[in-house]
Amino acid sequence: MIWIRRVSIKKSLVLILICFIEFQCQFCMGKPAKTNSDGAARQRYLQKAAELMSGKLPVLAARYADCVRELSKKTQVKIDKDFKRTLCKGCSSLLKPAKSADVRIFGKHRSQKKIGLTCHICGTQRSFLIADKPATVKKQKKKETKNTRGNK
């Protein structure tokens, strides 16, 4: 307790937050969640913590992101698409454009344009399509093809 008194209030709050998140991480890794809603709530909490710590302590943010990945495997809850795209597959750090990753756009045709992210820490490259087709458009095209086949 004497050590905490010497540290400023702001730093002590950060230390308490870090200890609490580490406890949350250890708790969720030790036992599988009882329901998917519990796992999803823990996952969202760790995602927010990783995003907040990415600018200040990137190593801690990578640890939380890794906990999110492990938790999603145990509870079988999918990771959000936006958060998953910002994770590095090599080192589990968060890929922020111009801060922790290089961004480039490549592809010849408009429907094949891709965004490429290269991690500064480990050099792992990720790429994904820029324009995803909405699910409604895909369903409509399937219905049209079924209708045209049935008419012939």
Image (cartoon, grey):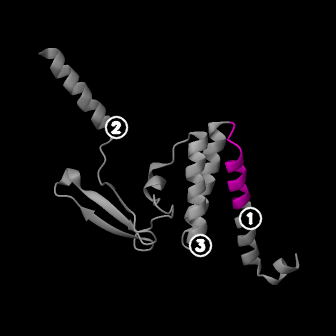
- Rendering coords of residue 30 (x, y %): 71, 48
Residue at position x 59%, y 51% from top?
44
The residue beneath circle 2 is: 135
Residue 94 located left or right of residue 116: right
Q: CA gap, disc 1 to disc 2?
A: 42 Å
Q: In which quarter of the image is the N terminus?
A: bottom right
| Residue span colored magenta | 21-34
Say if 80 sits above or below 102 in the image. Answer: above
The residue beneath circle 3 is: 57
Upstream in sequence: badge 3 or badge 1: 1
* Magenta residue check for 72: no
Residue at position x 30%, y 31% from top?
139
Q: Quadrant of the C terminus?
A: top left
Quarter holding residue 32: top right
Q: Determine the secondary structure under disc 2.
A: helix
Mark 2 nearby-residue class (10 Å; few <14, some 14–19, many ≥20): few
Quarter holding residue 115: bottom left
Q: What mark, if any, has residue 19 been given in the picture?
A: 1
